[in-house]
Image (cartoon, rainbow, N blue to C red):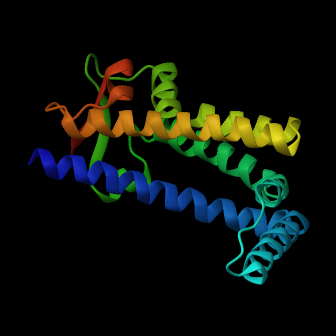
Amino acid sequence: MWLKVKVKRIIAYFIDFMIISFVSTIIFQIVFKNSYEEYNEKTEAYMQEIVRLGSSDPTEEFIINSMYDINKAGITLSIIEFGLTILYFGIISYITKGQTLGKKILKLRVVPIKGKNLNPGLYFLREVILTNSIFNFLGIINISLCSASRWYVFNNVITNTKTFITIILLGFLIFREDERSLHDIICQTKVIEEK
């Protein structure tokens, strides 16, 4: 039984992020068509250059500059994803009393350990920790303000820290018998299976 809920939580999380990614991409393609085309052009140019180089290694400077250009062109998409993540996981989840679409499909719900209702501030904090939104925000600031070389250094720090936090969150979820992850412990919540 314990493995079933843990697996369902992970699956629900991926369903939710696929929904956010899909909606973000649609908004990016339709509303911000010029930015979308620039993003695709930069990505395609990078891929063509990698194919052209074949077996010879591209220089580190080429990779850094290309990835910087791609990320710079995709900043609108990053902002859309950030906003939708906060809206979806934070606000909508609170309004629907602890259920995202992924949790609803898998019959899961976030509930407070004490009391009947979860404080909106703690619920929002729970979702910010869960989704690593702070690091997504730092990534947006990084690409907005830094040159390619500085962006690369800070991006590595942000990405590695985000990965480390994700591993900690998963570790708590997988190895704790009470099925509570770090964000659940901090915000005094648990995820239950609805019958």
Q: Is residue 173 left or right of residue 117?
A: left
Can the viewer see residue 104? no
Dividing the picture into quadrants, the one containing residue 36 is bottom right
Closer to us: 173 or 15: 173
On screen, 155 above or below 112? below
The image position of residue 169, as x and y in percent, is 37, 35
Left/right placement of residue 33 relative to residue 60 reads: right
Q: Residue at x 39, y 37 (%)?
A: 97
Residue 49 drawn above or below residue 81: below
Tell whether 50 sits left or right of 165: right
Position of residue 181 measured from the top left corner of the image (x, y, whole percent): 31, 31
Residue at 72%, 50% in the rendered image: 78
Counting from the top left corner in percent of width and height, residue 164 is at: 46, 35
Q: Nearer the viewer, residue 178 or 135?
A: 135
Question: Residue at the left extreme?
Answer: 1
Please say whether residue 66 is visible from this viewpoint: yes
> Which residue is the extreme one toward the front?
56
The number of numbered badges drawn on the structure is 0
> Residue at position x 45%, y 28% from top?
126
The quadrant holding residue 50 is: bottom right
- Expressed as whole percent of the image width and height from the top left, the position of residue 26 reads 70, 68
Which residue does the image show at 43% across and 59% down from the upper left? 15
Q: Quadrant of residue 174?
A: top left
